[in-house]
Image: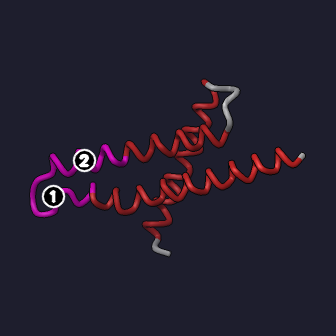
Amino acid sequence: MNSTLMAAIIIITLSSFIIAKILKKFAKKASPYLLFAIADIIIGLLILGFSIYDFNTAEGEFAGILGELALLIGEPIVIVLLIIDAIAWYTSRKETKNR
């Protein structure tokens, strides 16, 4: 696996956990799965905002390339993390109902 992709996966995942931990301070009774999903959505919106900003303000030969890379690398990682979070939530919920 490419080291750049691996670094992006690690950074986005750790950022999601850190933001979820911060959110837990404000919403003590909220589900950790919900907080992780909210953190992922926040990161996804930040990546999208940066990409739009880069598309509109960049000039020169490589105009908008950072925004394009952020969309091509960052957003799929966020989506996969959301899918994994949904699967973990569903599995946890199913096990709780069986008890």
| Residue displayed at 59% across by 43% down | 36
Percent from the top left, x then y, of residue 78? 48, 54
Percent from the top left, x then y, of residue 43? 44, 44
Mark 2: secondary structure? helix
Mark 1: secondary structure? loop
| Residue displayed at 28% across by 50% down | 51
Amino acid bearing label 1:
Ala
Give the label, 1 or 2, closer to the camera. 2
Please, what is the dominant secondary structure of the magenta stretch?
Answer: helix
What residue occupies the far left of the structure in this picture?
Answer: 60
Counting the numbered discs, the total is: 2
Whether residue 60 appears in magenta in the rendering, the answer is yes
Q: Nearer the viewer, residue 10 or 40?
A: 40
| Residue displayed at 53% across by 39% down | 38
Amino acid bearing label 2:
Ile
Dots 1 and 2: beta carbons under 8 Å?
no
Q: Dot 2 surroundings within 10 Å: few (below 14), some, or many (20 or more)?
A: some
What residue occupies the far right of the structure in this picture?
Answer: 99
Of the residues under marks 1 and 2, which one precedes in the sequence? Answer: 2
Q: Quadrant of residue 81?
A: bottom right
Cα gap from disc 1 to disc 2, whole angstroms? 12 Å
Whether residue 51 appears in magenta in the rendering, the answer is yes
Q: Height in image: 88 above or below 26?
A: below
What residue occupies the far bottom of the structure in this picture?
Answer: 1
| Residue displayed at 68% across by 36% down | 31
Find disc 2 in the rendering and name its residue: 52
Q: Dot 1 surroundings within 10 Å: few (below 14), some, or many (20 or more)?
A: some
Stretch in magenta: 47-67
Percent from the top left, x then y, of residue 70? 34, 56
Q: Nearer the viewer, residue 21 or 38?
A: 38
Say the numbered circle drawn on residue 63: 1
Percent from the top left, x then y, of residue 39? 52, 41
